[in-house]
Amino acid sequence: MNALQIKKGSTKHSAYNLRPQFSDVQETHTLAVLVDNEAGVLARVIGLFSGRGYNIDSLTVAEVDHTGHLSRITVVTRGTPQVIEQIKAQLGRIIPVHEVHDLTTEGPSVERELALLKVSGDGDKRVEALRLADIFRANVVDSTLSSFVFEITGTPEKIDAFADLMRPLGLVEMARTGVAALARGIA
Amino acid sequence: MTRQMTGAKMVVQALRDQGVDTVFGYPGGAVLPIYDEIFQQNDIRHILVRHEQGAVHAAEGYARSTGKPGVALVTSGPGATNAVTGLTDALLDSIPIVVLSGQVPTFMIGTDGFQEADTVGITRPCTKHNWLVKDTNALPGILHQAFHVAKTGRPGPVLIDIPKDVQFASGTYAAPPKGSTYRYNPQVKGDMEEITELVAALETAKRPVFYTGGGVINSGPAASQLLRELVEATGAPITSTLMGLGAYPASGKNWLGMLGMHGLYEANMAMHDCDLMINIGARFDDRITGRIDAFSPNSKKAHIDIDPSSINKVIPVDIPIVGDVAHVLEDILKVWKARGRKTNREALSKWWAKIEEWKKVDCLSYKRSEGTIKPQYAMERLEALTKDRDRYITTEVGQHQMWAAQYLGFEAPNRWMTSGGLGTMGYGFPASIGVQMAHPDALVINVAGEASWLMNMQEMGTAVQFRLPVKQFILNNERLGMVRQWQELLHGERYSHSWSEALPDFVKLAEAFGAKGILCKDPADLDDAIMEMINHDGPVIFDCLVEKHENCFPMIPSGEPHNKMLLGDASTKDAIKEGGAVLV
Ligand SMILES: Cc1cc2nc3c(=O)[nH]c(=O)nc-3n(C[C@H](O)[C@H](O)[C@H](O)COP(=O)(O)OP(=O)(O)OC[C@H]3O[C@@H](n4cnc5c(N)ncnc54)[C@H](O)[C@@H]3O)c2cc1C
Ligand SMILES: Cc1ncc(C[n+]2csc(CCOP(=O)(O)OP(=O)(O)O)c2C)c(N)n1
């Protein structure tokens, strides 16, 4: 399990006693959910969010342990502290869920997202797009005489900022993966 | 021990290995191989219901009255969709049941085949877990795991969808694993620090109250035993939700009666005024809390629940204890004894004095009548004439359900089966069949309203065919009484579609099914009629014509706190404010 870089630690009490439970403040949390990679498991997780009226800002899923057939779902969600606690507890009830980690409260973590952006145009705009891509460390993964496809990784905010800049320069299409996140440090 | 056998045979073998003696079901094309296996053995009894909803409710009744998982078997498509209400009911009331459904063969899935439905898709949100089995070799493991999931932790319904080719194909059968090898094993022991904190609070509390629920029943008979010990030892008053009745005996000296929307005045007042609330296996349902921001405003709250999602879901608590009721109560008692068995005696006697005052309100009193049978009177007489028997009660949903909860006394757990969370009209009759199957010699009575009862009346066929002497005690007000009561209180007495005309003659209906019918409309005849029902060796429909416009009190209007109870008709005018009217 350590190979999966999942932060160990008791979630039994989660953050019951740490934060005011019934505050109205909306918080954004990134949750890592380790599940059996079996048919329907994603539907169970998504159905939980829609059925109970929780928000999904971003969701990524892929098998991360091919021998144990475990998938890691990273979900970014929003809610009051009470709702966030409920979401974690409700996720924990799903039978194929092994672990639920709140990367937002369990210590520092890194978040990255990958995006592909198609920008079409010529002349100065094309040059400017390329120059900005360089500043953002975006790679050109496809080009024609009048278009580029840029690949960029970073925080969602960085990708938003890059997309905002590309919009006037001819952004025509964009694909994003959603956030993948890991706790920092060794354990 | 492993053996080669067909999937259909595996189903029957796994049921046997899981100790199942009864299956409630209804056949169809997609489960014929399983029915063929059922035909060729005698260990497992199959009860042919008349509608799959009935099979699931019967399995629920069986489960709730025995503590063992109930089992239902249905065909694909319409068989499975008919099971959905029962599954949802079991999910909301935490009842362990295993439903087996047939499915079109694997190679036809997704082709809109005959009687194909996406059963796992449809039942995903109304089961604790479900499986579509695509390989016969996986079937035994899934069957055993299904029983484990249904009864472990917070119990609930599970469903296994078995395509027909998987039933026909052969594979290797393995018996259930010895000991628990499953990853799914929620913690049962509570945190000792929290438990000690609770004991400390109990030692000094001036106005404690135990608020217990269905979780005590779920936890098993030992939990009820420990609860009784703890209540006697600490001398604190105890109330229970609808789902927890019988865990503490109604004749017990600390019993306050049921709490909540139609609960007793003393129970609700105690909840509102307490300084320490100890929730044991209850879930702060909205029928209990009333207006959240005015719910027991000055109390410290402890909550014992096996499901972490129940804690802080609705009401923030000060002492959360995740664990199984029996395990946690055992530790509480141990710690309490070790610390010198302390209670705040002086304060407790003042608290009881206050409670005695509330009891004097006599909130269950009602206007008696010589001419018509008051539903409350019918319940009082039923109680008087049956309480000393080996009795199990099921109910339908509505006013009669509340009157049964208020006027019948339960001395032991697992003797009261009712649809609380989903409030499913049509639950009680099939549930009574399930209970009677599990307890062939007991007196099983379904307290019903005529409207609810009609929803699954086809099960008369089942009762007669299998000689199940279930007593259908119908409080017939010729109204959808609970709906009518709300329309009276909330909608200006505009009784929109809350009465049923063209009701059947229930006596003739009973006779048409080959059962006995009894009609009673005079209070003077009631006792004799009830005795006739009890003494008849066979199913009975008892048509008890009661006062048509009786309201069920006490009642906490929606959107109001506990101390704003309505006690009788005089207090009801404009009692429900605009905000409350949107609540159910
Ligand atoms: C018309 C109508 C009117 C109603 N009016 C009332 C009313 O006046 N009063 C009332 O009380 N109810 C009433 N109800 C029922 C109400 O809707 C709820 O079903 C009921 O209050 C819930 O009971 P509970 O809190 O005991 O929870 P349950 O639904 O029984 O839940 C049990 C809780 O215990 C936990 N648990 C399960 N197993 C264990 C274990 N082994 N150890 C520890 N915890 C465990 C579960 O996680 C869950 O949180 C009414 C229903 C209807 C249909
Ligand atoms: C399946 C279903 N449909 C509708 C309701 C809404 N409902 C709750 S109580 C009730 C009336 C029940 O009437 P009856 O069974 O005659 O009992 P009474 O209230 O008269 O005692 C209705 C319609 C429900 N609970 N279940």
Image (cartoon, rainbow, N blue to C red):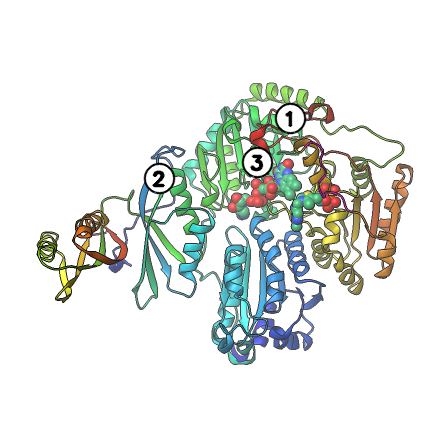
Residue B429 located within the stretch drawn in magenta: no
Circle 2 residue: A15
> Helix or strand or loop: what does disc 1 sit on?
loop
Residue flagged by tag 2: what amino acid is it? Ala
Q: Residue at x 72, y 63 (%)?
A: B50
Circle 3 residue: B582
Q: Residue at x 67, y 30 (%)?
A: B264
> Residue B166 at x, y = what percent?
53, 76
- Numbered disc in front, either 3 or 2: 3
> Residue B483 at x, y = what percent?
69, 40
Q: Which residues are magenta?
A: B492-500
Q: Residue at x 36, y 53 (%)?
A: A99
- Residue nearest the observer in this picture, B419 or A115: A115
- Residue nearest the observer in this picture, B323 or A29: A29
> Residue A119 at x, y = what percent?
18, 59
Q: CA distance from mark 3 to mark 1?
A: 14 Å
Mark 3 vs mark 1: which is more N-terminal?
A: 1
Q: Residue at x 78, y 62 (%)?
A: B461
Residue B499 located within the stretch drawn in magenta: yes
Snapshot quadrant of residue B14: bottom right
* Chain that bears disc 1: B
Vertical side of B167 occupied by A84: above or below: above
> Helix or strand or loop: what does disc 2 sit on?
loop
The label number, if any, that marks residue B575 in the structure image:
1
Snapshot quadrant of residue B63: bottom right
